[in-house]
Structure formats: C-alpha cells, structure tokens
Image (cartoon, grey):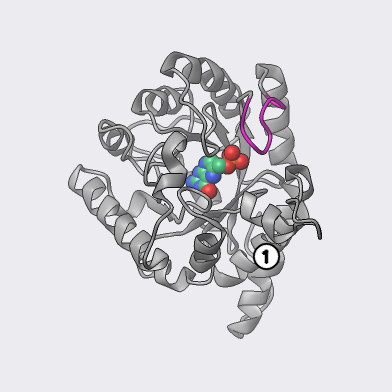
Amino acid sequence: MHAGPAGLPAAARARLTDLGRPAVLAVLNVTPDSFSDGGLWAGEDEAVTHGLSLVAAGADAVDVGGESTRPGADRVPEHEELRRTVPVVRRLAAAGVPVSVDTMRSGVAAAALDAGAVLVNDVSGGAADPDMARVVAEAGCPFVVMHWRGHSRAMAEHARYADPVAEVVAELRSRIEDLVAAGVRHDRLVVDPGIGFAKDAGHNWALLGALDDLDRLGLPVLVGVSRKRFLGALLAAPDGSPRPVEQRDDASHAAAALLAAHGVWGVRSHTARATADAVRVGAAWRRAREGQDGQDRSP
Ligand code: PMM
C-alpha cells in the first residue's frame, strides 16, 4: 500500500471514509512514556505484532506515534521519532494495514508517507511545523487537524477559555483556512477537538456536548477520548483518587458509542474489538433514530 502524490489508494480511502459507521483509528504509541500505553510497544517487533492484532480485532487503521504528547512531556529529537516510527509504519503498510502517522513534524510525516502511511494525524494541525502543509498538500493524503494551543510542556497554561466551544471552533476554522491557503485540499481535512490538549475536564465535556458546533465546520470529525484523564476524574474513587489509566476502557467504549450515535467520522482508541462493537451500536442507534434500517455497510 503506497500513498503517492495522487493520494490514498482507493481501497484504504474507502475503508476510512465509507463505512456507514465511524472509523476506528487504533493507537499504537511506539514510545517509552505515553500516558496510556507508554513502553508497552516500544520495540519494533512488539509494535508490529500489536498493530496487526489491532486490525485483526476490528480496527480500520493504526495510528503510529513516536512522540508522547502527554501534558508536561518534553519533545524527542526528530531522528529518534523517525527511528521509532518509520520501520513500524513500513512493516504494517507492507502487511496491508492502513497506517496513520501521529506526528507534528513534516520530516516524519514525509518519511512515513514514503514508507506507506495513508493518513497524517497532527495534534498541532500543522501549527508546530511550517512545512507540514506543503508535505500533506503534495501527498494529497487525508490530514487530521487537531485543536492545539502549544507543546505539551506548557499545555496546562493554555487551558484558559471564556467560551471553550466557540474558541476551539474559531481556532480550528483559522487553521483550516491557513492550510487551504497553503495548498491543502479542503476535502482531505478531518477536524478533531483535541480532547485533553490545553483543556481541563470541564472544557472537554463542553466540547463533547457541543459536537454540533464542530460539525458546522463542514468537515469529518475525529475524536479521541480513550483512557484520558477526564475519564479518570469522572470515575474517581470516593477518596478522590482518579481511576487508573488501565481501568478506563469501559468508559472509553461508552463514549465511543455515544460519539457514533452523534455521527462522528472516526474515533481514536487504544482498543479495537470493543471500540468497533461500540461504534456499531452507536451507528445503528443513530440510523434507527433517523428511521433507517439498522444495517451498517462495513465489510
Ligand atoms: N490524543 C493523543 C495523541 N494523538 N491525535 C488526535 N487526532 N486526537 C487525539 O485526541 C489524540 C491524538 C494523546 O493520547 P495517547 O497518548 O493515548 O496517544
């Protein structure tokens, strides 16, 4: 599977955009320090095996990341991000897996596309690297534009909003305009509210409660809630201690079903089978509400 200048291979594009339910973008962090799965798949073989198992269990694509974006994290050098991600992308793509690369660096995006990735997921929406727009414009690949206000080290300082929904939508709109002005095709863009990025729990819930406002941007919406801190806070023990990361999957799946019932384009998740089940339930619920039959069109 190769994404040349003409863009995404038809089969992969179809799998990502025409499922009749949200796509499941499964997380594969090839990092020692991500909050949710850091260190688990840091070796190349372990990462590839896990990526294949995610697809076998129902993921539509695997999102390979080599730099942790947890709040407070320092950046890794580009050569290290390349070393972690490119071999894994190449092996998964060669095995026929639709691969997304989770990176803020144009050099990593270009190398991953060359290795067979079919989608670029940039948590900065192209803001961290002035060359990202050119790379994705030339590749013609889908590009996830996430709402972001700055690198992880200083993220908490940016979590200040008078009106979180209006500000996130306005900032995403301005990113989209910049990207289109730089030559990225509008119909290649996907937007993401960036749950947990420069946002506290209240901001996250406000955004999840106002997905209609995001829909007004006129682009497919991807949302990543899986295992995030605001779910840990929601499920806190009576003494106030947050639910540990590894015990947040049931809540993540409940949220995935609700996101599907809303009609999002995709969900980013650490689990495959349960998330695929959850989005099918949510999508069937949505169709039933709209008076259609309960069947999905996924393969
Ligand atoms: N969250 C994380 C990393 N990448 N990409 C998108 N598009 N949306 C997200 O919400 C998102 C992301 C952080 O979570 P992780 O450390 O579990 O990967």
Q: Residues within 10 Å of mark 1 (few under 14, many from 20)?
A: many
Residue at figure coordinates x 72%, y 30% from the top left: 50
What segment carries the magenta color?
A: 33-41
Does label 1 point to a residue whose CB lies under 8 Å from ligand 1?
Answer: no
In the image, what residue type sits under mark 1? Answer: Ala
Percent across and percent down for residue 287 are: 62, 77
In the picture as drawn, the residue positioned furthest to the right comes out as 238
Q: Is residue 292 above or below residue 225?
A: below
Q: Quadrant of ligand 1?
A: top right
Image coordinates for residue 1, horizontal then vertical, percent: 51, 31
The answer to whether residue 190 is left or right of residue 293 is left
Residue at 54%, 31% (x, y): give it.
Answer: 68
Image position of 230 with respect to 113: above or below: below
Q: Residue at x 31, y 34 (%)?
A: 132
* Residue beneath disc 1: 257
In the rendered image, residue 241 lying in the magenta stretch gets the answer no
- Depth check, front residue: 217 or 142: 217
- Residue 282: quadrant of the picture: bottom right
Magenta-colored segment: predominant secondary structure? loop
Name the foreground residue: 57 vs 96.
57
